[in-house]
């Protein structure tokens, strides 16, 4: 499993070189496991595609999970910043297993039809209000984990998405204050069973979106101050090396600030909550004829400045 994960990562790295992305040297928080460490740990990815700095080695009092870390706010972040500047030993990427940067959040909020070009693809009007649905947190897996095809579905599809991670609790948050509640951003794959989304379960989207393994996240939570402009990033999905989605987050109908203001009218947002902000055009269901994922496929979801996640379909 670890060997195949390494191989997928190397493949992704070679594939990613086709895009002129600059590796980030900024704050890239990760959750990981390593053979010599007990349980999951919190770390810093040393640049996009680099090794991992173990934050516990720098300060053993730091939490071991991202949600606890985010809950400590600026105090924890300042320790991580000092660790980043300290030029600590880096664990080689081949020796660690990357977990999702956030696991078991209170909620995973999703936004439908939030790209102008994705609406055009479906020949539907651009929404006047955000279309909100959710995935259960049990659907979250790591950036190089496998996506399992459920026997209940024959129409599993891909969707690359920019994910926002909440860093500060809030309710009724104003759009002008919204970024103060954001910890950072990561790459998400909103795997979707179209038969269950579009025809079953009374056409409620939830079940089609929330099978186990249907929410790969990662590789890192890139803090908001490390991202130049989250609404002007190249976003891409490849299936077996072929580009199937290619757009920019500047196509988003409702930006991060508007989404946080909208969602927080209804629910309290907690540190670690994840908001998937929608997908660009190029999904399989709207192709002629439709194309769906099959056993053996490899899906790479990539966002400029954030990185690439690679998931084998089994």
Image (spheres, rainbow, N blue to C red):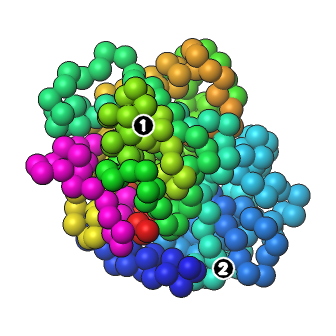
Is residue 20 something one can see in this rendering?
no
The x and y percentages for residue 77 are 71, 49
269 left or right of 39? left
- Return the residue nearer the eye: 262 or 61: 262
The answer to which quarter of the image holds residue 165 is top right
Categorize mark 2 by other alpha carbons within 10 Å: few (<14), some (14-19), many (20+). some
Relative to 122, say whether 243 is above or below.
below
Residue segment shown in magenta = 278-301
Q: Position of residue 44 (x, y in %)?
A: 64, 64
- Asked if residue 99 shows in the view, the reply is yes
Relative to 291, residue 127 above or below? above
Say if 272 sits above or below 8 in the image: above
Along the line of sight, the residue nearer the viewer: 49 or 80: 49
Q: Residue at x 20, y 21 (%)?
A: 125
**Residue 196 point in image, percent of width and height:** 38, 39
Q: Which residue is mark 2?
A: 91
Residue 48 vs residue 198: left or right?
Answer: right
First in sequence, mark 2 or 1: give its number: 2
Q: How many marks?
A: 2
Q: Check disc 1 and report the residue beneath it.
A: 277
């Amino acid at each position: 499993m670890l060997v195949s994960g390494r191989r997928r990562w190397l493949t992704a790295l070679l594939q990613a070189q086709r895009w002129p992305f600059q590796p980030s040297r900024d704050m890239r928080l990760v959750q990981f496991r390593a053979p010599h460490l007990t349980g999951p740990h919190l770390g810093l990815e040393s640049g996009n595609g680099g090794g991992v700095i173990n934050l516990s080695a720098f300060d053993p009092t730091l939490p071991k999970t991202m949600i606890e870390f985010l809950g400590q706010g600026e105090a924890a972040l300042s320790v991580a910043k000092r660790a980043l500047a300290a030029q600590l030993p880096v664990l080689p990427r081949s020796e660690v297993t990357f977990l999702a940067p956030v696991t078991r959040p209170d909620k995973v909020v999703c936004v439908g039809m939030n790209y102008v070009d994705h609406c055009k693809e479906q020949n539907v009007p651009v929404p006047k209000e955000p279309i909100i649905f959710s995935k259960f947190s049990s659907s979250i897996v790591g950036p190089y984990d496998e996506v399992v095809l459920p026997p209940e579905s024959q129409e599993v599809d891909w969707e690359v998405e920019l994910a926002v991670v909440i860093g500060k609790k809030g309710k009724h948050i104003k759009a002008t204050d919204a970024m103060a509640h954001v910890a950072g951003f990561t790459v998400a794959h909103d795997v979707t069973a179209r038969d269950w989304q579009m025809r079953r379960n009374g056409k409620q989207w939830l079940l089609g979106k929330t099978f186990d393994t249907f929410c790969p996240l990662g590789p890192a939570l890139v803090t908001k101050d490390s991202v130049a402009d989250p609404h002007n990033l190249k976003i891409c999905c490849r299936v077996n090396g072929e580009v199937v989605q290619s757009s920019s987050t500047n196509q988003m109908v409702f930006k991060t600030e508007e989404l946080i203001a909208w969602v927080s009218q209804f629910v309290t947002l907690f540190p670690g909550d994840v908001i998937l902000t929608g997908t660009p055009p190029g999904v399989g269901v709207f192709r002629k004829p439709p194309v769906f994922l099959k056993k053996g496929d490899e899906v790479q979801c990539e966002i400029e400045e954030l990185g690439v996640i690679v998931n084998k379909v089994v």
